[in-house]
Image: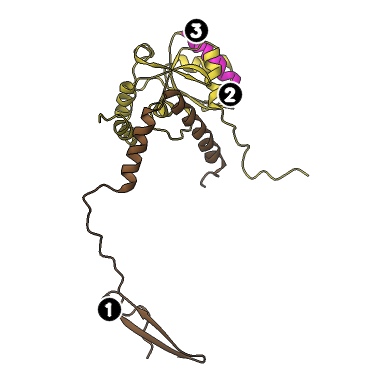
């Protein structure tokens, strides 16, 4: 007898593995968003991995390769293959990729988000289980949160300011 | 005589209600609801101070430790979010 499935199969998020795959594939990226907020001391859960990647085509190709390996589906219904994901990325728009390891959000085309080169020049390197990951600087993170301006961003911004206020 | 239980609710008056039943007299007292707001305090709420202290403590920890803990929390959150059925 087949068991009744109340809800669709739950994803088993593994952000560590996703980041490790990206670093192993030598994808050039900077961690931003919720995981960067965590890194800077405001530790709270986040539902996706936000990265700003170097827009150089070969780099986006490597990123697409990792994503295709981990992908189940993307918001664009036809974008399943590496080539299709790479094509989406090269359009310069924000791409959210639902992978087996958790949602990967490649942040692109948002006003207020500096380029990869700018972010990388000021980023800090963090040793983690995943290897060495570049995380955006605190100043860049606060600037991006301020520019995004959603209630959750402003709450993060307030917490970051409290966490790093001078004594 | 048994008054309606809500009588006096708006005025905040006290009412002693007595009902007589087969098992005897039952008494109850209705008193004014105290909806008066508490006087404001000058100190911030305790929870805010505790939260701020925790934030400042976490900010002193190694970045890698914060990232690892954030990832672990996120895994729980994603599992929890995916277990919640979508609203119709």
Q: Tell me which chain appears brown.
A: B
Give the class, few, some or many, for how many residues have Cα within 10 Å of label 1's Cα (few <14, many ≥20).
few
User: Where in the figure is residue B78, as x and y percent of width and height?
Assistant: 52, 35
Q: Are marks 2 and 1 in contact (CB under 8 Å)?
A: no
- Rounded to the nearest whole Å, what is the CA distance between mark 2 and mark 1? 67 Å
Mark 1 belongs to chain: B
Of helix, strand and loop, which one carries label 2? strand
Task: Report which quarter residue B28 is drawn in.
Answer: bottom left
Labelled disc at residue A71: 2
- Note the chain letter of the yellow one: A
Magenta-colored stretch includes residue A66: yes
The residue closer to the viewer here, A43 or B86, is A43
Residue A162, label in figure: none
Q: Give how far apart the Cα atoms at labels 3 and 1 are.
A: 79 Å
Q: Which residues are magenta?
A: A57-71
Which residue lies under the disc numbered 3? A58
Left/right placement of residue A97 relative to residue B14 reads right
Q: Position of residue B20 (x, y in %)?
A: 45, 91
Q: Chain of mark 3?
A: A
**Magenta span has B5?**
no
**In the rendered image, the vertical position of residue B47 relative to residue B65, given as above or below:** below
| In the foreground, B84 or A45 | A45
Residue A153 visible somewhere in the drawing: no
């Amino acid at each position: 007898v087949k068991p009744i499935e109340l809800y669709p199969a739950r994803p088993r998020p593994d952000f560590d593995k996703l980041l490790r795959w990206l670093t192993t594939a030598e994808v050039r990226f900077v961690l931003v968003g919720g995981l960067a907020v965590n890194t800077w001391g405001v530790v709270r859960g986040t539902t996706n991995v936000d990265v700003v990647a170097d827009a150089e085509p070969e780099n986006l190709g490597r990123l697409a390769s990792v994503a295709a390996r981990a992908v189940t589906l993307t918001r664009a219904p036809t974008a399943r293959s590496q080539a299709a994901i790479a094509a989406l990325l090269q359009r310069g728009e924000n791409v959210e990729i639902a992978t087996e390891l958790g949602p990967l959000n490649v942040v692109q085309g948002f006003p207020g988000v500096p380029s990869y080169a700018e972010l990388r020049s000021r980023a800090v390197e963090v040793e983690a289980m995943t290897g060495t990951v570049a995380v955006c600087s605190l100043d860049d993170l606060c600037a991006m949160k301020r520019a995004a301006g959603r209630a959750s961003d402003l709450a993060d911004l307030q917490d970051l300011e409290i966490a790093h206020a001078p004594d | 005589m048994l008054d309606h239980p809500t009588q006096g609710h708006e005025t905040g008056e006290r009412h002693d209600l007595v009902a007589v039943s087969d098992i005897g007299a039952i008494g109850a007292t209705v008193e004014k609801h105290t909806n008066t707001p508490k006087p404001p305090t000058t100190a911030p709420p305790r929870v805010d101070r505790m939260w701020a202290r925790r934030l400042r403590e976490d900010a002193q920890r190694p970045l890698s430790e914060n990232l690892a803990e954030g990832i672990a929390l996120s895994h729980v959150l994603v599992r929890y979010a995916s277990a919640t059925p979508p609203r119709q």
